[in-house]
Image: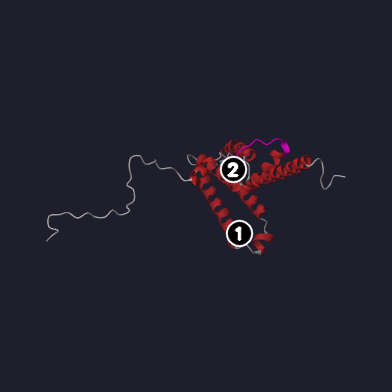
Amino acid sequence: MASFGTTQRIPNSSEPPSSSSTEEPYEPKASHEKQFREFNFYCPLNIPLTPEAAALRIIRNLGNLGLYYTLFVWIILFITLIPQRKVSLILLVIMSYVTTLYLLLLKAYPNSYLLHRVLDKRFVLALLAIATMVQLIVTSAGIHLGVTLACSVPIVLLHAVLWISHQEIISENCFEASGVAELALLSDRIKNGGEGPDMA
């Protein structure tokens, strides 16, 4: 009863400091800042310096991106055939289906002697392309084919000239790294007064 009417004080405990308005604003982590600092704009288009480099780049890109270029030409031809040439359009779709089945057979049987050794893939694809062109000409869609090729082939060649492949980027990086290493070795020799392992 002695404590009746009195208030007891709770001992102070170690409480974490409350957030106040003077607290510093949120700062991003160092890794985020590093990511933003190291962001570089990459453009995979470049004009080759010599005609030989342009020809080499065209051959390389036609080999690597040939499927995409073919699809690009096929889509343009398909769009031009829609309004008037229904029979030619059906034949184009059938030949595309046959070509797709052939490519799927090549992927499904990678060890087939007949598909990979006896029948050359380039020969079969060229034969299918020629058969498609002949069918389009026979069904009076030759002018559509000519206009499509005249419009799409320059675009394809321009892209093949300007597009830098990953192999070319890797070879350029290796060349630059070897050049930097040679410059570092040369500067070390100059600092050492011309003394080096191959100096007489």
* Residue indicated by mark 1: 106
Helix, strand or loop status at disc 2: helix
The magenta stretch is 44-52
* Residue indicated by mark 2: 137
User: Badge 1, how many Cα within 10 Å: few under 14, some, many 20+?
Assistant: some
Residue 93: x %, y % from top left: 52, 49
Amino acid bearing label 2: Ile
Residue 55: x %, y % from top left: 70, 40
Amino acid bearing label 1: Leu
Residue 130: x %, y % from top left: 63, 47
- 135 is higher (above) or lower (below) than 116: above
Whether the magenta-drawn stretch holds residue 51 is answered as yes
Residue at 34% x, 51% y: name it.
Answer: 16
User: In the figure, is residue 114 to the left or right of 32?
Assistant: right
Which secondary structure is most common in the magenta stretch? loop
| Nearer-the-camera pick, 21 or 27 | 21
For the residues labelled 2 and 1, the Cα–Cα distance comes to 29 Å
User: Which of labels 2 and 1 is toward the front?
Assistant: 1
Labels 2 and 1: the sequence-earlier one = 1
Image quarter for residue 139?
A: top right
Q: Which image quarter holds the C terminus?
A: top right
Whether the magenta-drawn stretch holds residue 190 is answered as no
Image quarter for residue 168?
A: top right
Helix, strand or loop status at disc 1: helix
Tell which residue pokes out farthest to the front in this image.
2
